[in-house]
Image (spheres, rainbow, N blue to C red):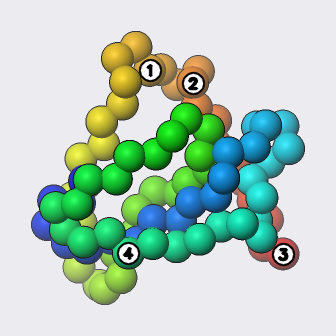
């Protein structure tokens, strides 16, 4: 939920984590300030970024008992 600026989010369909993200399936969406986005479990995503030079504060809500073990950071090399 972007609180004070629009943001861009990058998302791709869920795949098995060991397969890595499907780079050819990533899409970028513009999310207006104040708009809630819900991602399904397993959807590949990147942290939101702003389309301008202004910072954005975002509210991220996770299900109860979500821990670091439920997520994994993956380094994707440029193609």
Question: Dot 3: within a 10 Å radius of its alpha carbon, few (fewer than 14), some, or many (20 or more) residues?
Answer: few
Q: Quadrant of residue 31?
A: bottom left
Q: Which of label 1 and label 4 is nearer to you?
A: 4
Name the residue rendered at 59%, 46% in the picture.
43
Would residue 39 be found to the left or right of residue 41 on screen? Answer: left
Instruction: Give the distance between the C-alpha atoms of the residues marked 3 and 1, in whole angstroms.
Output: 32 Å
Of mark 3 and mark 4, the one earlier in the sequence is 4
Of mark 2 and mark 3, the one earlier in the sequence is 2
Instruction: Give the distance between the C-alpha atoms of the residues marked 1 and 2, in whole angstroms.
Output: 6 Å
Question: Dot 1: within a 10 Å radius of its alpha carbon, few (fewer than 14), some, or many (20 or more) residues?
Answer: few
Of mark 4 and mark 2, the one earlier in the sequence is 4
Q: To which residue does mark 4 refer?
A: 30
Q: Decide: marks 3, 1 in contact (CB < 8 A)? A: no
**Measured from the top left, where is residue 63 in percent x and y?**
37, 24
Residue 78 visible (yes or no): yes
Q: To which residue does mark 2 refer?
A: 70
Q: Which of label 3 and label 4 is nearer to you?
A: 4
**Measured from the top left, where is residue 40 in percent x and y?**
51, 40
Q: Decide: marks 2, 3 in contact (CB < 8 A)? A: no
Name the residue rendered at 26%, 53% in the picture.
36
Of mark 3 and mark 1, the one earlier in the sequence is 1
């Amino acid at each position: 939920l972007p609180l004070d600026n629009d943001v861009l989010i990058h998302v791709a369909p869920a795949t098995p984590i060991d397969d890595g993200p499907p780079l050819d399936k990533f899409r970028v969406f513009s999310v207006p300030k104040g708009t809630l986005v819900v991602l399904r479990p397993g959807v590949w995503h990147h942290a939101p970024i702003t389309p301008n030079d202004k910072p954005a504060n975002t509210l991220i809500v996770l299900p109860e008992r979500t821990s670091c073990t439920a997520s994994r950071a993956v380094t994707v090399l440029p193609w």
